[in-house]
Amino acid sequence: MKQDIVVIGGYGHVGGDISKQLGAKFPGKVYAAGRSLERAKQFADQTGGQVKPMAFNLTNWKQEMAFERVKLVVMCMDQTDDAFAQACLRSGTHYVDISAYGPFLTSLERHTEEAAQAQATAVLSVGLAPGVTNLLARKAQQELDQLDSVDIAIMLGLGDQHGKAAIEWTVDSIGSAFSIVENGGVTQTVSFSGGKRTDFGKELGSRMAYRFPFSDQQSLPRTLKVPTVSTRLCFDSGAVTRLVAWIRATGLFRLLKVKWIRSAAVSSFGMMRFGSDGYAVKVDGWGTKNGARKHVQYLVDGSHEAAATAKVATAVATAVYEGGLPGGVFHTEQLFELVKSGKGKIALQAAAGITKRPQIIEGLRYDSWE
């Protein structure tokens, strides 16, 4: 009987929080999986038995995964090959992925018919960005008669503790080329180019943010049929944001391909502890309502970006594990929406036509204005 939940990367920076939160909800059914059984055991011991350890290596998944016991896999590691995810879906195992690598997520969409036939649900774009960003874009679409363009901006606090994998992805993405959709057509842009000032509200003020290859800007034109979507990134320190943009503009980012320089850059970002531990996600939507042009704005902020990602992922994983969702491959905004739950609080609620109890997401503050 399928009842196990396997969190791959389940003792890492974000995966550890997800494992603990799911373990509290479904004690004894959650496995924190990773290459090191010893690290998995040390982590599981801290949960008092709510989470169990598992040795798992993605390169040997055919020998290591017993799909007949696993009801849900939560993937907290970056991948470029979709073979494992496809195997999950073919076996009827549900799948939730928190990664932000657009090409990989796009490749998974091709397996939606296989998933539907096996009655397996896959949910992509799960977390803060992508994830909350997608859900706020959905709110903009619901508010307007027609949504023409969406600007997404993410601000990260340098005083926060970020996982090594996230730091490596950020460093490796500086100056990288990626695809975006503008006016319905696909075009190329470069990371940390195209600076644009974003209003993050009264408390945080406005910041200059730069293009960054988050996957939401590649999936939203397909899921919400928005002609233009852009996602930008900044840090709570304007000086550091400008420095990274300057490194990109001068071409110095090419030095990051040198192994020791890259390692030094990753270490430097990891050791930074000035600034705040806060984050903010801002979505601006432009379109029409009742024949008039309208601009809507949504903001979610809080402390500890990794913890926020884990909370959203746990809410999605819980809904998937409890059943009742359609089979297929979906992005978060295709199955869920954000709703207010008390003053400034938000909950994850299934989209219209799907009966599910709302999942309260603690610690995320929500605001909107026009």
Image (tube, rainbow, N blue to C red):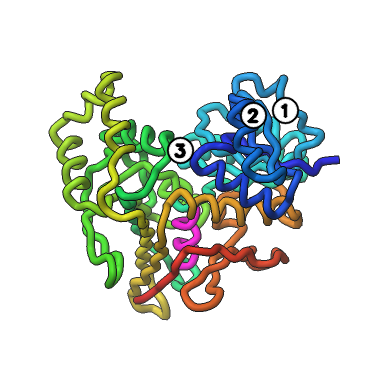
Q: Main secondary structure of the magenta part?
A: helix
Residue 137: give x, y in percent of width and height.
45, 61
Q: Work out which quarter of the rendered image holds the N terminus and state it.
A: top right
Spatial CA distance of label 2 from label 1 is 10 Å
Q: Which amino acid type is marked by label 2?
A: Phe
Point out which mark residue 101 bears: 3
Residue 84 disc label? 2
Label 3 Cα crowd, 10 Å radius (few <14 / some 14-19 / many 20+): some
At mark 1, the secondary structure is: loop
Span highlighted in magenta in the image? 131-140
Tell me the mark number nearer the camera, choosing from 2 and 1: 1
Q: Residue furthest left?
A: 250
Percent across and percent down for residue 228 are: 36, 54
Residue nearest the observer in this picture, 197 or 268: 268
Side of 193 where 19 appears, left or right: right
Left or right of residue 248: residue 232: right
User: In percent of the image, x 34 and y 58: which residue is there?
Assistant: 151
| N-term-proximal mark, 3 vs 1 | 1
